[in-house]
Image (tube, rainbow, N blue to C red):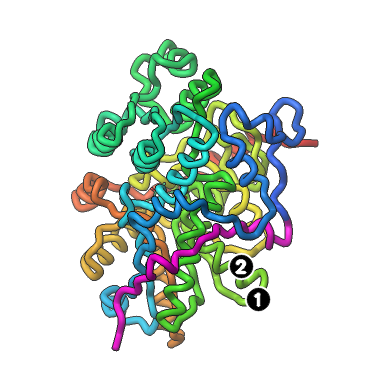
């Protein structure tokens, strides 16, 4: 009998997160203070994050207990299903076995609640009254809004103005969960007012929205800030995905040769891949873990490993990562969650050490892949997830050519129900592939040479 969906019993949900730092051959370099170029200490981060999350950020412990209230909240939508993509396999006429882990069943439709719930919980334990954050198209803002109301915390979201106006549905969901949502740049912060003075019609950017959220949190002791990707503790919380997938594949009697996920900041890739990478690092296994980025924002494949700011305005500590430079402005592609100039410190170090692989994909073939997936598997993928699917299809074709029966696992990190304008634009022929000139990248990276420690 061929099983389509592999469900894990609630009682078998993993009860710890996996911290890959314990098993990394080269530990991540420390974040640096931009002024002194000295490592930042936990106390430097306290105005923005609760102590429990700062401790997770620097932890070397391999397995970190998931608190019971977080487990309870996870049980609303976890364990998520692992699905064998028979329909896609058949359409590709491939001997490869293709599985996907489906995170779109969460309250916000993506993997983001896995960390939003944990972050809201730890903030509530330390008496935090309000959390500020930024959001682009709204995936992260929705997840955090849901999580904050679970734990009785107010949530204030700075949403990039162009999305605030063009994509009202996610904003309405954030309001439904009780959050206040402001179009950024706003007149509520110094950062926002400065930008509006210079350019009253500024449509905003993630960098500006981060600056506004950070400024509001820093100004009030009972308010903290939350980030939905990039940081070590965020990646840690997402490892529930891969640990579940491992158990589910075992139930199917299978084991992956290739693990694939899209990469914006690195959290859903890490979430799926790190628990498998553990087998490479500790048991001599040889799984290929491939992070897929957009060709229009290619930090992993064309960026450089350097110290750089995490935000556009230069408010964060300097992080050692693959980056295109914090001034890099990616073309306006439809996978909004992947338009970030850098990659998480953990993913960057692993790539530098040759322990993971990276690929870049143009957006039109990604939408082609997403449409084929929707037709054959019945789920409309988020445009971000289409990058993984395009890579899966490439690997499935290679398996066909070589006649090898590979097992491929990928992260269907979200559904695309709020991204139908993107699909509409694709069908209307309005999308373009972007050839990114090398001068643009070189120029933008030249701008961060002065940030490097000597
Ligand atoms: C936010 C988001 C991403 C990108 O963020 P990562 O931290 O790299 O996972 C990818 N897909 C979806 C659906 C998202 O919401």
Q: Quadrant of the C terminus?
A: top right
Percent position (x, y) of residue 416? 27, 52
Classed neighbour count for the residue bearing mark 2: other residues with Cα under 10 Å, few (<14), some (14–19), many (≥20): some
In the image, residue 103 above or below residue 320: below
| Residue at 44% from the left image edge and 85% from the top image edge | 405
Q: In this view, does 239 lie to the left or right of 20?
A: left
Q: In percent of the image, x 57 and y 44: which residue is there?
A: 231
**Upstream in the sequence, badge 2 or badge 1?**
2
Q: Where is residue 302 in the image (x, y as percent from the top left)?
A: 56, 50
Q: Residue drawn 41% across and 15% down?
A: 188
Quadrant including the N terminus:
bottom left
Answer above or below: position of 383 versus 98: above
Magenta part of the chain: 1-26
- Give yes or no for contact between labels 2 and 1 (Cβ–Cβ under 8 Å): yes
Which mark, by number, is residue 278?
Answer: 2
Residue 385, visible in the rendered structure:
no
**Residue 289 colored in magenta in the image:** no
Q: For residue 216, which numbered disc appears in the image?
A: none
* Count of numbered tags: 2
Q: In the rendering, at what x and y percent does residue 272 appear?
A: 48, 62
Q: Position of residue 232 (x, y in %)?
A: 59, 48
Q: In which quarter of the image is residue 179?
A: top left
Q: Name the residue under label 1.
A: 283
Circle 2 SS class: helix
Q: In this view, does 423 lie above or below 244?
A: above
Q: Distance between the residues labelled 2 and 1?
A: 8 Å
């Amino acid at each position: 009998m061929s099983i389509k969906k592999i469900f894990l019993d609630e009682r078998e949900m993993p009860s710890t997160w996996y911290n890959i730092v314990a098993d990394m051959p080269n530990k991540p370099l420390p974040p640096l203070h931009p002024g002194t170029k000295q490592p930042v200490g936990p106390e430097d981060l306290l105005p923005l994050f609760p102590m429990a999350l700062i401790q997770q950020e620097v932890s070397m412990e391999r397995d970190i207990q998931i608190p019971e209230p977080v487990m309870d909240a996870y049980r609303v939508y976890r364990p998520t299903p692992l699905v064998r993509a028979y329909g896609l396999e058949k359409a590709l006429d491939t001997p490869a076995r293709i599985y996907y882990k489906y995170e779109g069943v969460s309250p916000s439709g993506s993997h983001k609640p896995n960390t939003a719930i944990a972050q809201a919980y730890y903030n509530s334990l330390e008496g935090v009254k309000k959390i500020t954050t930024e959001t682009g198209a709204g995936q992260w803002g929705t997840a955090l809004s849901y999580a904050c109301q679970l734990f009785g915390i107010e949530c204030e979201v700075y949403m990039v103005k162009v999305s605030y106006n063009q994509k009202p549905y996610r904003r309405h969901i954030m309001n439904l969960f009780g959050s206040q949502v402001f179009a950024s740049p706003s007149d509520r912060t110094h950062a926002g007012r400065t930008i509006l003075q210079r350019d009253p019609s500024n449509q905003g950017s993630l960098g500006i929205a981060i600056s506004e959220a950070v400024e509001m949190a820093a100004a009030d002791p009972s308010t903290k800030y939350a980030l939905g990707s990039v940081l070590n503790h965020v990646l840690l919380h997402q490892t529930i995905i891969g640990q579940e997938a491992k158990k589910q594949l075992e139930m199917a009697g299978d084991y992956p040769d290739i693990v694939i996920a899209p990469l914006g900041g690195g959290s859903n890739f890490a979430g799926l891949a790190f628990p498998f990478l553990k087998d490479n690092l500790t048991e001599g296994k040889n799984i290929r873990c491939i992070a897929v980025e957009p060709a229009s924002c290619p930090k992993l494949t064309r960026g450089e490993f350097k110290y750089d700011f995490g935000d556009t305005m230069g408010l964060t500590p300097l992080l050692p990562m693959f980056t295109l430079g914090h001034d890099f402005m990616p073309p306006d592609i439809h996978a909004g969650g992947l338009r970030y100039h850098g990659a998480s410190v953990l993913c960057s170090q692993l790539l530098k050490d040759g322990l993971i692989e990276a690929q870049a994909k143009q957006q039109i073939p990604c939408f082609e892949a997403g449409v084929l997936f929707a037709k054959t598997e019945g789920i409309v993928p988020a445009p971000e997830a289409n990058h993984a699917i395009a890579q899966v299809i490439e690997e499935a074709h290679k398996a066909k050519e070589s006649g090898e029966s590979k097992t491929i696992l990928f992260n269907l990190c979200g559904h695309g129900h709020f991204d139908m304008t993107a699909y509409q634009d694709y069908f209307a022929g309005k999308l373009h592939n972007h050839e990114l000139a090398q001068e643009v990248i070189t120029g933008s990276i030249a701008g961060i040479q002065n940030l490097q420690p000597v």
